[in-house]
Amino acid sequence: DGEVKQNIASAIERGLKIGLECLRGDDTRLMHPEAVRCLLLYIKFFDVCRDDGIVFDMRGECISLFCDVILSVPFEGHKALHGWALNLYPREIFAKMLVQPLLRALNECLKFSVDENQVSHFQPSRQAVPVIVAVISWLHTIAEESNLASPTDFYSDGVSQISVGALFDDLQRMKRASPRERSKNFHICAYPFLLSPGCKRNLLQMESQIEMYKAMLGDIKFSESQRQITVDPYFHLEIEREHLLKQTLEKIKQTDAKEIRKRLRVSFKGEEGIDAGGVTKEFFQLLSEELFEVNSGLWSTKYGNDVNWFNSDNTWNDNNYELIGLLFGLALYNSVLLDVRFPLAVYRKILGLPLGLEDIIDDDLRKGLQQLLEYEGDDVEQVFCLNFEVTWMELGEEKRLELKPDGANIPVTNENREEYVLRYVRWVLVDSIQPQWDSFEKGVMKVMESSSLDLFLPEELELLVVGSPDLDFEALEVNTKYEGGYDKNSPVIKNFWKFVREAPKDTQVQLLKFATASCKAPIGGLGKMDFMIQRAGPDSAQLPTSHTCFNTLILPDYGDNYEKLADLLGRAIIECEGFGLE
C-alpha cells in the first residue's frame, strides 16, 4: 500500500545519501573502473521512487549529491565511467536506463504552481537543475558520438512547460553574455537538446516578432504639415497571380532590407481577401511551385524531381539565388511553410555544420565511395583505377578538375583513399556550388542574420521550413473546436469526419490545403494545430468556404445528408482558389 511504498522510498533516499557521501571527495576510490561502475546503477533509483503520491528527495539533495559526485570524478575514473556507459548500455536501453530517469528528476525540479495572485511558486529542488543538466549533457555527448539515442530521447517536458517569455529572456541573456559570463551563469538555452522543436519554434517566432517591431519603429515618419506621426507596420506585397514569380522578384529587388524585416502582408490584385495570414500562406505555396521547379535551370536535374540541389552549371544567375535565399528567409521569418525539397545537407550548411559522406545525394556515388573505404584488399590502386581528379559534363563539354595539385597524376591507394573521399565529398557539396551557395546564403541572412537558428538540429530546421508530410487526421479530429452551434456529435460533423476518413490521400491533402493553405502539418503534427469548424447557417446548396488565416472551415449545416456533404465539399476543395470574388 501507499505507506509501505513511502517507507521504501524514504529508506532508499537515506541509503543513497549515505552511499554518495562516502564516495564524494574520495578521488582515490573513484579512479578505479569497478568503483565508478556503481554510479551508473544509482541513476535508476531516481526513477523507481517517483510513483504518484510518494514523497522522494523533495529538496533535491540526493540528485544534487549524485550529480556532484559524477561531475567531480577524476580524469581516470571519468574515462572508466565513459567506457561503462558505452559497453553496458547499448542503444536499446541507453535512454531508458540512463537518460529518462534524469529527465524525470529534472522535470520534477522544474515543476511550479501559480496561486490566486498569479505568483509562481517553485519546487525547493529547483537548485539541483544546473547539475542535473550538466550530467544529461555528458550523456548527450556520449549518445551523439556513438549513436546510442535519438534527439527525441533528450527532449524535456519540464523545459517545454517553461513559458516562452522566460525562455526567451534566458536566451537573450545568454546571447548578450561574454564567454566568461556564460561560464559563470547557468542558461537552460545553452542546452538546446532539451528543447522540443515546438519550443524552439516559439522562441524563433518571438525573436521574429521583436525584429518586426524594431523594423516598424525604425520607419516612423513625422508630417510637418499635418503635425502627425505615421507608421506602417507591414511590408506590402501586391502582385498578380498570372505574374506571381516575376513580380515578386522585381518587388524584392527594389525593397530595402529594413523594409523586408517588417511583417509581410500579401494581396493579390483584383481579389478582396485581407491578409491575416492566410493569403501569405497561399502566396508562398504558389510561389514554391514556381521557385523550386527543378527544370527552371536553377536546380540540378541529376537527382529527379524530388530534390532541389544547386545547379553548378548555372554561373549566370547569382542574383536569383540571392533572391531565392531572401524569399526562403522571409518564409521562415514569417512562420510560413514552404514546399521545397532540399536535402538535409542544405540545412546542415545553413547551420554551419560539417558535411560528410552521408550527405552525398547521389546514392550510387555514395555507395561507391563507401565501398572504396571499406575495401579490404591491399590493391585499391589496381581495382578502382582512380586518381585525384573529377570529371563532369557542363553544357555538353567534359570538364576536369584536380582535387589537389597534380591530382591527375596521383593514384588513389590504400594509404590515401580517405583523403580522396574527403576531397571528393567537399568538391561535390561545397566547392562545386560555392558561388550559388554564397548568393543563396547571403539572401537568407539578410532576413535571419540575428536569429537563433543554431538552436535547431538540421532535421528540426527542415521540419520548421517544410512541415511534416505525416498527416494524422485522427489527431486533428480530437483537437478540433466547433462554433456556431456545432459540436462533435452534430450529424454534419460526424459526416464530415466520415468523409475525411474514407477520402483518398490526395483528397485529404487538398482538403487540408483548402482549410489551412498548407499541404503539410506543422511541428508537432496536426494534433497540435489549431483547427475550427464553424456553422455557416442552415442547410443550403452553398459550398463550404474557409478562413485559412485562422485554420477555420466554414461548413453549412447539411444535416445527416452524407451524399450532399461529400458532393459539395469535394467540389469546394477542387474548384476553389483565391480569396474573395474575382
Image (cartoon, rainbow, N blue to C red):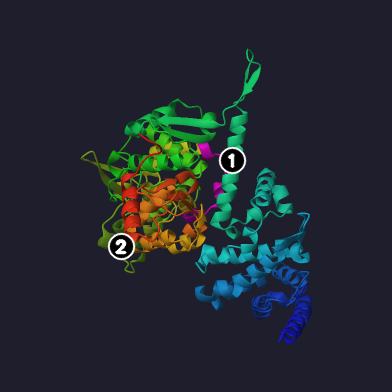
Residue 452 is covered by the magenta coloring: yes
- Judge left or right: residue 556 versus residue 157: left
Please say whether residue 472 is visible from this viewpoint: no
Residue 298 image point, x, y percent: 32, 39
- Residue found 51% across the figure and 67% down from its top: 146
- Viewer-proximal residue, 543 or 64? 543
- Give the residue at the far top of this rendering: 225
Give the number of the disc on residue 380: 2
Q: Quadrant of residue 412?
A: bottom left
- Magenta range is 447-460
Residue 349 image point, x, y percent: 46, 47
Looking at numbered disc 2 in the image, what kind of residue is underneath it? Val
Residue 445 image point, x, y percent: 51, 38
Q: Quadrant of the N terminus?
A: bottom right
What residue sits right under mark 1 in the picture? 209
Secondary structure under tag 1 reads helix
Q: Quadrant of residue 419?
A: bottom left
Looking at numbered disc 1 in the image, what kind of residue is underneath it? Gln
Give the number of the disc on residue 340: none
Please say whether residue 578 is visible from this viewpoint: yes
- Viewer-proximal residue, 292 or 351? 292
Q: Image height check: is 354 above or below 320?
A: below
- Viewer-proximal residue, 231 or 19? 231
- Residue found 66% across the figure and 51% down from its top: 167
